[in-house]
Image (tube, rainbow, N blue to C red):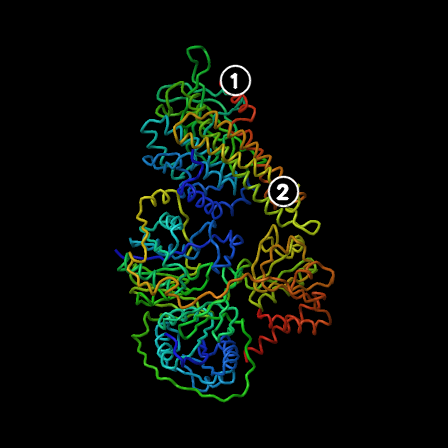
């Protein structure tokens, strides 16, 4: 049976982002008490996999790296239709940047979901919005990657036409071997969780593994394995400039356009 | 007593919020204009599992239960109370068929209802009275292989979309000479059945409420639901344990809809240089709305929980219905107060909440009927 | 890569599409030049494609001291694995201290893989790059939809990699400069290009939806007539944006209900908002408070909008808009040359 692995990230619910506060000592954002949701683009990724399950009988495995209180988001992925879910959770994984995160997720995939035919991610998470993890997971798995995927087409579930959205062109690739795809919201409309799915999810396997259980190299995970560090974290002040421009239309428009160019919107 | 909702119930709520936003919200404007329930919504509610909430899995439902039903109906109603109304009435057909139906009846009708192929309806009320149930004029007489029904039912919700209706009619007298009633499963295709007028309601527009006309309507013998003479029992039990809590859940949805709209408006509306949410009078109104909403919610959930536990709960359900529907109206009134002149403008939802809440009050029994029931309970137990 | 004493130089990956160099690479060259001058080191540009030698020379006038050119027919179209392999081996050989990539879809597809191969750190969509007191590159990024800013550093590994959105830095003025173009050897076969490209199609210009528009042009009661409304549509087309309206304009029938912005209408989150003939009452302003830059054109100097905008032009829309459209067209023509 062909297998798709979907990487899912629980993020703080955007509805409550104004409740995020800074921990001045640790220099990190306090996320406690803020409900988590599945990163929206990950649902699009999951929908690609579930469509393959419906049409061609693929197995769908969901993986995630997150604190243990986010199991509800994995349960939601199971309720959407995924077959099995695995969470990498361990103190040693904390403070990971994208490289350490990708190494961890690739390690988890190798441990619980090999062989796999397709690795799917959302193109970007709403909180960190780096778009870096998918290509880096592909590197650790030794397979190619395509990001900004706006279309996934297949007639037989074996050969795929993948369309990547660049700035001015669409590029389409032909794939028939394992690959990592990062999808945008154009790729599909994710199905809703229905009540039958919620009940079925309770019987599906949902496992938590720690770093040792996955077999990860301690020097490559968490803060130890992260080449980047946060030196400072702060809230920007948004103040309107309130610059009023008066005069003849020719002069006034010229000044406006220069200002807009200076602030980088033109 | 655990007041925390389970993970399953939290996920249910979340999913129903998303369903309502995606599938129902875009239809609300048209529902308000036409007063019609969008037929495409029936199967969608079936696919998402709302239709099968009180039906056992062996008959095609999911059986998640009555608390789940309360939560699901509430979230649907928050977006469209009319849709919540149609859904809850649908359950008033599902439950009595499963509770009193024969195996054949259950196998024949329940899967279709659970899938949302059609919505159910339950009809007791007549021009001669709904509150005065014993005054029912519609009769059913045994003639050969049929029961022949004659009469007129009114205020039947889902009348114009339902293919499976549970109808109560007078079938004779009991041993003490009082009128006796029986329940029947009626399909619109039966000879002698027709739909009468469609009511144009001032609220809960988007759910059909209409008349059923029986002129020598031939109902096959095997469609008698329960035993002869059990009609009143079936009717009252259905109203108490499904109809009233269903209306309560609709009311809860309306309460929270008013709370959210009013709070949003108060934070954005600037008068005297500041958002009006800074004013104590507005904060007091919001506190009152919150108080009424929370009261409605927890009474409703308590009744639903008792039903899931198999405990007798007629009184608790009647109380929940009384409180939730009356509170919905008060919440909407106060939300309108906060909106000031904007409450009169149709683009703003609060005027719809007010009209919808008004119509929930006499649905499933008037508030006065509820108080008759509660008064009796007090006299008996205190 | 672990740092050694001899990691030096600020490099920029130069993106090209169908032979034409994108502005973002030039903008990054300007920033790299500034940082390199502060540290007394050089700027390198890395260019891959099917590019004639003389195209590469233009990069010198934008600040590059060296241009590493990988030119080959098979590199004309972007391919992640091929580009990564070539750039990585060059970086390992030359050891730059920093490498910047434009945060276009192409750059965002390439940079992470490259960073992983080089086992180094990468920060995404930087809104600023500057040198810390310790000479380390400070990379400022936005998170949580822009409501938080973080300063990221890559203290040990090299090169320090960062992607930057187009338009964050200014494109430098070209000046006559000395430097060299270094043609690099390209060893690439068809079989390296996995998965193979099937087709490259230009994107059709779609009408922009208001909710997701980067640029929103909003008309108010001050627009005066449906005739004048056409100017807003032309402006939106020039800027790749969408047209919205305030309630009074909708009531006048100049625009449909669906594009009404405000409390009982839509909320928009554009980079640039231009309100023409809009007075700026609260009902409307709440719908645009997340806009990055707010521009207002109104003939009434006492309109409330002037208190909550970035740039306010006092003038009649009939006089200002035609000039604005004309000058935008002129600037766009100039860019094409």
Q: Position of residue A63 (x, y in %)?
A: 34, 56
Q: Position of residue C27 (x, y in %)?
A: 52, 76
In the rendered image, which quarter is residue B237 located in?
Answer: top left
Seen from the viewer's position, the closer of residues B94 and A196 is A196
Picture residue at 48% right of the left edge, 60% below the top:
A27
Q: Is residue B174 above or below residue A225?
A: above
In the rendered image, which quarter is residue A183 located in?
Answer: bottom left
Q: How many marks?
A: 2
Q: Position of residue C32 (x, y in %)?
A: 50, 78
Picture residue at 65% right of the left edge, 47% below the top:
B278
Q: Is residue C300 above or below residue B27?
A: below
Q: Is residue B138 above or below residue C176?
A: above
Residue B88 seen in the figure: yes
Seen from the viewer's position, the closer of residues C73 and A95 is A95
Q: Earlier in the sequence, mark 2 or mark 1?
A: 2
Residue wearing tag 1: B379
Seen from the viewer's position, the closer of residues C288 and B349 is C288
In the rendered image, which quarter is residue B242 located in?
Answer: top left
Q: Position of residue B14 (x, y in %)?
A: 45, 45
Which numbered tag is attached to residue B138?
none
Residue B235 is left or right of residue C221, and the answer is left
* Circle 1 crowding by C-alpha within 10 Å: few under 14, some 14–19, many from 20: few
Q: Quadrant of the N terminus of chain A?
A: bottom left
Q: Contact (CB < 8 A) between labels 2 and 1?
A: no
Residue wearing tag 2: B283
Residue A152 is left or right of residue B295, and the answer is left
Q: Residue furthest bottom?
A: C178
- Identify the secondary structure beneath mark 1: helix
* Subunit bearing disc 1: B
Residue A54 seen in the figure: no
Q: Quadrant of the C terminus of chain A?
A: bottom right
Residue B89 is left or right of residue C278, and the answer is left
């Amino acid at each position: 049976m062909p297998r798709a692995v979907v990487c899912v990230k629980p993020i703080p619910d955007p509805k409550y982002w104004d409740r995020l506060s800074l921990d001045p000592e640790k220099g990190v954002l306090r996320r406690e008490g803020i409900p988590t949701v599945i990163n929206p683009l990950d649902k699009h990724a999951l929908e690609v996999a579930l469509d393959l399950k419906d049409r061609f009988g693929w197995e769908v495995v969901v993986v995630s790296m997150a604190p243990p209180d986010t199991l509800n988001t994995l349960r939601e992925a199971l309720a959407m239709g995924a077959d099995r879910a695995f969470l990498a959770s361990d103190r040693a994984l904390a403070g990971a940047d994208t490289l350490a995160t990708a190494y961890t997720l690739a390690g988890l995939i190798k441990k619980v979901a090999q062989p796999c035919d397709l690795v799917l991610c959302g193109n970007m998470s709403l909180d960190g919005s780096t778009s870096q993890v998918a290509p880096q997971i592909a590197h650790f798995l030794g397979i190619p990657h395509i990001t900004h995927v706006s279309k996934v087409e297949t007639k037989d579930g074996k050969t795929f036409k993948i369309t990547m959205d660049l700035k001015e062109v669409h590029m389409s690739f032909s794939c028939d071997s394992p690959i990592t795809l990062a999808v945008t919201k154009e790729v599909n409309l994710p199905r809703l969780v229905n009540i039958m799915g919620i009940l079925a999810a309770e019987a599906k396997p949902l496992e938590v593994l720690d770093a040792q259980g996955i077999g990860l190299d301690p020097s490559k995970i968490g803060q130890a394995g992260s080449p980047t560090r946060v030196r400072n974290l702060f809230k920007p002040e948004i103040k309107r400039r309130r610059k009023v421009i008066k005069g003849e239309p020719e002069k006034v428009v010229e000044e406006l356009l220069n200002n807009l160019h200076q602030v980088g919107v033109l | 007593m655990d007041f925390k909702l389970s993970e399953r119930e939290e996920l249910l709520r979340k999913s129903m919020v998303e369903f309502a936003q995606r599938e129902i919200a875009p239809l609300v404007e048209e529902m308000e204009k036409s007063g019609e329930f969008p037929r495409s919504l029936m199967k969608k509610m079936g696919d998402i599992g709302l239709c099968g909430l009180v039906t056992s899995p062996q008959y095609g439902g999911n059986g998640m239960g009555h608390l789940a039903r309360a939560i699901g109906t509430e979230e649907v109603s928050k977006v469209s109370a009319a849709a919540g109304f149609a859904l809850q009435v649908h359950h008033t057909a599902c439950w009595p068929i499963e509770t009193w139906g024969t195996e054949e009846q259950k196998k024949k009708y329940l899967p279709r209802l659970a899938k949302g192929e059609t919505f159910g309806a339950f009809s007791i009320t007549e021009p001669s009275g709904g509150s005065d149930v014993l005054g029912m004029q519609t009769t059913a007489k045994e003639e050969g292989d049929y029961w022949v029904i004659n009469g007129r039912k009114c205020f039947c919700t889902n009348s114009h979309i339902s293919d499976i209706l549970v109808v109560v009619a007078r079938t004779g007298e009991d041993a003490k000479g009082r009128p006796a009633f029986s329940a029947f499963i009626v399909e619109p295709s039966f000879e002698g059945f027709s739909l009468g007028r469609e009511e144009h309601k001032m609220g809960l527009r988007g759910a059909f409420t209409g008349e059923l006309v029986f002129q020598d309507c031939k109902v096959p013998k095997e469609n008698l639901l329960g035993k002869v003479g059990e009609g009143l029992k079936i009717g009252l039990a259905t109203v108490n344990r499904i109809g009233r809590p269903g209306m309560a859940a609709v009311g809860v949805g309306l309460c929270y809809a008013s709370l959210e709209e009013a709070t949003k408006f108060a934070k954005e509306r600037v008068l005297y240089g500041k958002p009006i949410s800074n004013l104590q009078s507005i904060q007091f109104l919001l506190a009152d709305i919150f108080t009424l909403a929370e009261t409605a919610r927890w009474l409703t959930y308590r009744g639903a929980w008792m039903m899931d536990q198999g405990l007798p709960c007629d009184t608790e359900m009647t109380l929940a219905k009384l409180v939730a529907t009356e509170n919905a109206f008060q919440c909407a009134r106060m939300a309108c107060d906060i909106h000031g002149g904007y409450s009169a403008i149709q683009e703003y939802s609060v005027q719809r909440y007010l009209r919808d809440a008004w119509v929930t009050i006499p649905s499933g029994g008037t508030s006065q009927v509820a108080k008759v029931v509660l008064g009796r309970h007090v006299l008996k137990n205190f | 890569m672990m740092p050694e004493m001899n990691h030096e130089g600020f490099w920029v990956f130069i993106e090209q599409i169908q032979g034409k160099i994108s502005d973002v690479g030039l903008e990054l060259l300007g920033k790299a030049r500034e940082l390199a001058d502060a540290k007394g080191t050089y700027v390198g540009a890395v260019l891959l494609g099917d590019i004639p030698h003389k195209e590469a020379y233009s990069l010198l006038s934008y600040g590059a001291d060296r241009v590493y050119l990988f030119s080959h027919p098979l590199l004309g179209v972007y391919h992640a694995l091929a580009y990564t392999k070539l750039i990585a081996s060059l970086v390992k050989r030359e050891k730059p201290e920093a490498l910047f990539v434009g945060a276009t879809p192409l750059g965002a597809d390439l940079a992470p893989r490259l960073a992983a191969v080089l086992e180094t750190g990468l920060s995404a969509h930087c809104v600023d790059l500057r040198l810390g007191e310790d000479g380390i590159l400070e990379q400022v990024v936005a998170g949580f939809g822009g409501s938080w800013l973080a300063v990221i550093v890559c203290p040990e590994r090299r090169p320090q990699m960062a992607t930057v959105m187009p338009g964050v830095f200014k494109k430098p003025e070209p000046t006559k400069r000395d430097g060299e173009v270094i043609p690099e050897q390209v060893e690439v076969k068809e079989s390296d290009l996995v998965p193979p490209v099937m087709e490259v199609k230009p994107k059709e210009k779609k009408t922009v939806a208001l909710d997701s528009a980067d640029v929103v042009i909003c008309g108010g009661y001050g627009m005066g007539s449906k005739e004048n409304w056409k100017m807003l549509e032309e402006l939106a087309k020039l800027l790749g944006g969408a047209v919205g309206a305030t309630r009074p304009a909708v009531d006048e029938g100049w625009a449909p209900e669906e594009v009404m912005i405000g409390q009982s209408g839509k909320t928009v989150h554009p980079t640039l908002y231009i309100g023409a003939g809009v007075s700026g009452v609260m009902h409307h302003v709440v719908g645009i408070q997340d806009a990055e830059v707010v521009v207002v054109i109104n003939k009434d100097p006492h309109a409330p909008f002037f208190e909550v905008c970035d740039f306010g032009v006092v003038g009649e829309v009939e006089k200002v808009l035609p000039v604005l459209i004309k000058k935008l067209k002129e600037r766009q023509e100039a860019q094409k040359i």
